Image (tube, rainbow, N blue to C red):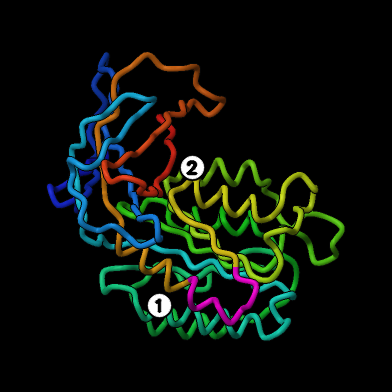
Amino acid sequence: MRLKVWASDGSTASHEVHTRAVAGAQRAIVSLVEVYATVRDEQGKFISDLKQEDFTVLEAGKPQNIAVFAADRKPVHLVLLMDTSNSMNREDRLLVAQEAAAGFLKELEPDDTASLIAFSDVPRVVVEGTADKEALTKAVFSIEATGGTALYDAIMAAIDELRGRDGRKAIILLSDGRDEAVSGLEPGSLTTYEQTLDAVLESETIVYTIGTGEMKEEMDFHRQRTVGEILETLASRSGGRAYFVKNAGKLDDAYREIEDELRHHYLLAYYPPTQEEAKPDRKGRVWREITVRVTRPRAKISARDGYYLR
């Protein structure tokens, strides 16, 4: 049995206890639903003075009682996901990306942890989760660019890297091209876009995407949607944001904005309501839709749009 406890300030602790099964007992799982949200004004500036009473969280259209509220910065478990395909050699893209990522790592808080995953033909975990900024920075500058772009497999590897971690989790993806093998004749990943989006939503991980070059308008390998649509959907549905940087020299700005957003998350947590369930999917899950509202006029909210009830 895994027990997780939330303090009034939003911090958590967990412990696992093994007990004998009791014959005839029913199994019940009661767990808070955590929603991390950022709020901006019409000019795009963060609104940081909101109180619990300024928020309304709705599940399936019905208001929920917010059991835990926190507005101060909480530790975050990150995965830096860096494209090291052959195209990153153009115009010193990789070097610029490495310098921007190193600058981002400097700004992490002491309690934050980060992993580094580089991906080309396959994803490779370069550094597992650590708070050692020096080791992370050294690893960032050690990676080289070659091969194709296994974009979806890389996101799946990042989700696996964060599996089992409590609290705020985020993936920061940097890529300059669509999911494609180095030959250009087949996809780069064994995983599909649809499978990847489903895994992101199930993992309850915030995704930030940074696209460089002209990839916003580029079509995916199957010519079903643009790469811009893919990156925007992965980010927005998970509660993150997508950034598109045509000039690699502007990557610093994208990383800086992400770090700023990580400082301005509100934590809103509530107990899921008991209600008649819809038919579970083939994995035995039921999707529940979440909407977050605030009283501040014309404010723009970023938060995940739902979760899977298991």
Decide which of 168, 236 is in the foreground and name it. 236
- Image location (x, y in percent) of residue 255: 46, 72
Magenta range is 245-254
Q: Position of residue 138 (x, y in %)?
A: 47, 86
Q: Is residue 249 visible?
A: yes
Mark 1 highlights which residue?
Answer: 105
Kindly identify which residue carries mark 2: 201
**Point 54% across, 66% down: residue:** 81
Distance CA(mark 2)–CA(mark 1): 26 Å
Crowding at mark 1 (Cα within 10 Å: few <14, some 14-19, many 20+): many
Q: Main structural element of the magenta stretch: helix, strand or loop?
A: helix
Residue 295, percent from left and from top: 26, 41
Q: Residue at x 30, y 38 (%)?
A: 33
Does 152 appear above or below 192? below
Q: Secondary structure at mark 2?
A: helix
- Assess whether residue 247 is covered by the magenta stretch: yes
Q: Which mark is residue 78?
A: none
